[in-house]
Image: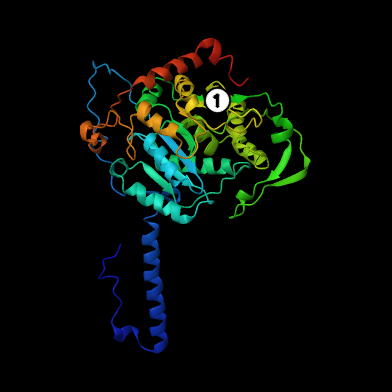
Amino acid sequence: MQSPAALQPPSTATIFKDSTKTTLYIVFATSFFSLLFILSLSSTTTTGGSFSSSTRRPDPFLFPTTRPFFPNEIPLDPTPPSIAYLISGSKGDSGRILRLLHAAYHPKNYYLLHLDLAAPQSDRDSLAVTVQSVPIFKAAQNVYVIGKADFAYPKGSSTISANLHGASILLRLHAKWDWFINLNAADYPLITQDDLLHILSYLPKELNFVNHSSYIGWRESKLLKPVIVDPGLYLKDQTDMFYATQKRPLPTAFRVYSGSTFAILSRKFVEFCILGADNFPRTLLMYLSNTPMSLSNYFPTILCNAHDYNKTVVNNNLMYVTFNKTAKEKPHPLNSSEFDSMIQSGSAFATEFQFDDPTLDRIDREILGRDPGKVVTGGWCLGDPDNGTKCSVWGDGNVLRPGPGAKRLEKLVLYLLSDDRFLSRQCI
């Protein structure tokens, strides 16, 4: 790049010979510096239109330089994996997203927060400012807010687009995470991240935890044969979904599998869906774009029709959920009466919680050990627990201190991976 002196215009005597040249010079100079200004703005925009919590490098205390390897050294524990979280919400969900972020936070993970277009832009801006004000988020450099939001209509196919968009941003932001988890504002963890990372560190990174079944049943006439047009794919405002008068037959080129909207997916499978050379994920995306509530079919159908992945599926998404007897696809709101059953299930997460339900306070107090407005204490926290500042001083993010939740999750995972259950329930 030229020096500032080299960019200075020639003298007035050589350039300003007449008024026409003067006008051209002014236009040129204005355009040039306007271009520089625009480029300077674009250089500060982060990947995917999201706002980073800071522009500094992560704190070296959280991620110290790797120690030299000694040939005879036997590591006591495997290196903890990293999880990429997409946490989504809508209008009025900023507070719930922040609470969920604090409850599921760990410095080794990555978090992408998404408020859909039903929420005003001021909510996204406020959320980004709040994230930037939390010291540990700024130190770890692992929390982002999507600035250019997507519309996610729960009953349509725009939720698939929003999930794939979030996953693609996380793929571009960081190259070292191992699993992708999509949470919404009604979800909440039942174990600490130290518990979850501890158990996942002993599992193959190719595993995908997805509820799935080839039994279609009532879904054939209610969810698969109807043809819809999701307004979230082309309109800014929320409107009713359009239904066609005719119905279409089920596909014969592949088999449709049903499941749930929540899943724990391996990075390799996410790359297959977004970056892979196989065209099936894109073909299925086009088919499901006109199918009601299609997110619950998308990932299970790809997994079970792809030969490289249908042996990696665990038929359980580690999410505790109960369904209404009358509405089979609508989760029943959880309350304190189900506290013991959801904890003893060994699940890592639960849904569906109402806004500020007292059950969440009990989970924070009895299970996560989390104070209001604070992140969950982990092995990386080195502060003083007596004055409530344990996580205001941090150490190595690779240090985990699993608790009782790890034992509950371990019991569930061992049951799911037992030979007679794991193999017999894959893509059934």
Kindly indicate the quadrant of the structure image that contains residue 213: top right
Q: Is residue 17 left or right of residue 245?
A: left
Q: Position of residue 401 (x, y in %)?
A: 30, 24
The one of 391 and 109 positioned closer to us in this rendering: 391
Q: Is residue 385 visible?
A: yes
Can you say whether 288 is above or below 215 in the image?
below
Within 10 Å of disc 1 (Cα), the crowding (few <14, some 14-19, many 20+) is some
Can you say whether 185 is above or below 9 in the image?
above
Residue placed at 46% from the left, 18% from the top?
413
Can you say whether 73 is above or below 289 in the image?
above
The one of 114 and 337 positioned closer to us in this rendering: 337
The one of 175 and 102 positioned closer to us in this rendering: 102
Kindly indicate the quadrant of the structure image that contains residue 202: top left
Residue placed at 56% from the left, 27% from the top?
322
Residue placed at 51% from the left, 46% from the top?
90
The residue tagged 1 is 309
- Placement of the C terminus among the 4 image quadrants: top right
Name the residue at the right extreme: 246
Q: Position of residue 342 (x, y in %)?
A: 48, 23
Tell me the kind of residue under disc 1: Tyr
Q: Of helix, strand and loop, which one carries label 1?
A: loop
